[in-house]
Image (spheres, grey):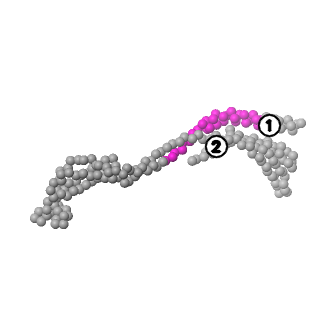
Amino acid sequence: MKETIQFILTMVLMGYIIWLHQCKGGGHDNHTSNQYHPDTTIVVDTILPAPIIVQLPRQTVPAPTIIYIDSSKNIVQKESIDTAIHQSVQLYQDSLEDENLTVYYQSVVEGELLQNSLDYKLKIPKQITKRIEITKPVPAPASALLFNTGVGVNPLGITGVTVGMQFISNKGWALGYDYDVLQNQHEVTLGIRLWNQKKFR
């Protein structure tokens, strides 16, 4: 009778401890279950350009620069110019641009450049990078029921064989019951979580 009363008192004490832990950790667990973890996905999309000829903006012809060329039509450096044997020509240089590219041109003309038109066909595809964030809730830990078994030994041999069950709560506590078959003893265990190990992604 005395052992039964002790067993009942032990169970009541453990239940009270679990209730205190439940009340203390309830608010924190509700907060944890409502946490959200953003997953970031980077999407790279390639867009092929349209197969059309693009006309660059038309501009007035820039003012020319006087340079000299030799008999092979090569430009003569300034320090080597001899007006007796080298021919003077007009050098036109400028740049044209739009949203896709910038074109630099240089034209050597004997007379006067009346008009300069440049067009192009774009062959390089465009790449568009998008950053997408998808918010997912962090799953709350689940409770579990485990089956336990164990063997006790000492130098003389086997001293006990235990079987039992253990309930692990998602609130951070565990309650277990073991029965020693050889010793005919009952054992009740209580566990409380000391810290949380976070999962890093």
Residue 16 image position (x, y, % from top left): 75, 34
Residue 146 in view in this figure: yes
Placement of 17 over or under 87, stated as above or below: above
Q: In this view, does 158 lie to the left or right of 99?
A: right
Q: Which residues make up the magenta segment?
A: 13-42
Residue at 78% over, 44% down:
165
Residue 76 in view in this figure: no
Residue picked out by circle 1: 11
Which of the labelled discs sits on residue 45, or is there none? Answer: none
From the image, give the main secondary structure of the stretch colored magenta: helix
Q: Residue furthest left?
A: 84
**SS type, badge 1:** helix
Quadrant of residue 6 within the rendered picture: top right
Placement of 165 over or under 90, stated as above or below: above
Residue 199 image position (x, y, % from top left): 60, 46
Q: Does the magenta stretch include residue 39?
A: yes
The residue type indicated by label 2 comes to Asn
Q: Quadrant of the N terminus?
A: top right
Residue 32 image position (x, y, % from top left): 61, 38
